[in-house]
Structure formats: C-alpha cells, structure tokens
Amino acid sequence: MESPLGFGHFLTHADGVAMVLLTIMLFASVGSWFLIANKGLQALRQRRSSTRFLADFWEAPNLEAVAARLRESGVTEPFSHLVHHGFTAIEQYNRRQSSGSAASLIDAGAPDDLLTRALKRAIDEDRSRLEFGQTFLATVASSAPFVGLFGTVWGIYHALIAIGISGQGTLDKVAGPVGEALIMTGIGLATAIPAAVAYNAFARANRNTLAELNAFAYDVFAFLATGIKTSPMLTDARTTSEKVIALSRAHHAADAAGLALR
C-alpha cells in the first residue's frame, strides 16, 4: 500500500506547475553535477600537466629546449599555452624582419608591444576557458532555493484549499499536504548547495591559476624580450641571459611558496 506521506504520493498528486518546477530543478541538478565532474577532472589533469611543464621549463638550459618540449608534447594546459603564444609572436616578428614586408595590424608596433599583446591574449583565452560553466553554477546556486520555495508556496496553497473543502483541520490532515509541499524546498536546497560549493571551489582554483599564470608571464616576457634584443634573427629567441633566468627562478620559487600558504 502506498504511504500517504511518501515521495511517490507527492508525485502522484503533483499538478502541472509542480511538475514543471521539478523538471527545472532536475535539469539544473544534472547540469550542475555534470559540470562538477567534468571541470573537476579537467582541473586535476591540468594541474598535473602544469606541474610537469613548469618543472621542465625551469630545468631547461635555454628556450630552444622549451621549444623542443612544446613540439614534442604539444599545448595541453595554460602555462604551455602562454609560452606557445610567446614563441608564435617572436616567430611572426622575425619573419617580418627578415622579409622586410610592411607590418599588419596583428604584428604592428614595437617587438615588446607585440609580445605583451600575445601573452595577454593567451591569458584572456585561458581565463575564458577556465570560467566555462561558472555562470551556470552561479545561476543554479542562487535561484534553485527560490524555485523550491515557490513550489512550497504553491503546494501549501493547494493543501489549504483541500483542507478548507474537507472542513478538517486536524494535525493528521495538515501534516501530509504541508510535508509534501516542503519537499520542494528540500529539493531546491539539494540542487543549490552542491552548485554553490562547486562554484566557490572552482573560482578559488581559477583565481590561483591565473595569479600563477600572470606571474609566469613576466618571466616569459623577460626571457623572450631578452632574446629579441640580443639575437633578433633567431626564430625562437634561443639566446637568453643566464642572470635573468637565475633571478626569475628565484622569484618563481618565492611566488610558489606564497601561493601555497594561501
């Protein structure tokens, strides 16, 4: 026998408005958990790839070794993507220098400006990719409780109408309909809480990644700008200052220690 207080009983007696609200929250919950799982796995793989790339980068004797590593393994995460954009900008500048052709808008300006724009463009692209799905999670986290509350109000309204028609307002008559109406609030909270927690977790992880990426961009700019000034005809700016590399390694270690304490 079906319990008059069970969830099945609630579904059986739910009207069209309640079913629409349940469908909306089901879609929001499934979408949230898909993004949580997908972005979580991507973040884990990206962190591992970034750690390996940064270790190889700081151990590389020169930028030619870094370029060889990129050609071998490809661009798989934000830090290698940033370096790839830097190399591409340098190669584009050197091709224009060697051919003597007029500069187009994409490579107009001084070499430092060209490199700065390329690195900023890479960071902006990575920021957009990292924040994919964040708007959906924020929307679910902020709106799902109110959708559930609307369902509760709608259910209590119908419960009060039914009680008024029957003329019986005893506790056993009120508890069932009101309890079923409160189910909507519970569903709304169950949908919103994972989305809110995931949004905050991903926002913090993205903020830390972008902070590291911005700090790393200064090192990449120093290496590549030194290569332009010392050997402008080399296509990948192999020549770099060992002193600059040593100082940048020290700054990178200090920045990594500071981020670890956050």
Image (tube, rainbow, N blue to C red):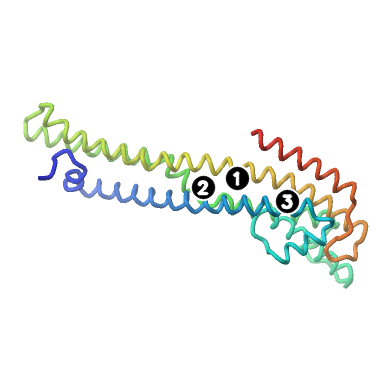
Q: Which residue is mark 1?
A: 206
**Mark sitting earlier along the chain (1/2):** 2
Circle 1 SS class = helix
Q: Residues within 10 Å of mark 3 (few under 14, many from 20)?
A: few
Q: Name the residue located 74 percent from the left edge and 54 percent from the top edge.
A: 56
Tags 1 and 2 in contact by the CB under 8 Å rule?
A: yes
Circle 3 SS class = helix
Residue 24 higher or lower than 237, as above or below: above
- Is 100 left, or right, of 82 in this rendering? right
Residue type at tag 3: Ala
Circle 2 SS class = helix
- Is 18 left, or right, of 122 in this rendering? left
Q: Which residue is mark 3?
A: 55
Q: Which residue is mark 2?
A: 134
Q: Quadrant of the C terminus?
A: top right
Tags 2 and 3 in contact by the CB under 8 Å rule?
A: no
Q: Name the residue located 74 percent from the left edge and 47 percent from the top edge.
A: 216
**Mark sitting earlier along the chain (2/3):** 3
> Which percent across, then down, holds residue 211?
68, 42
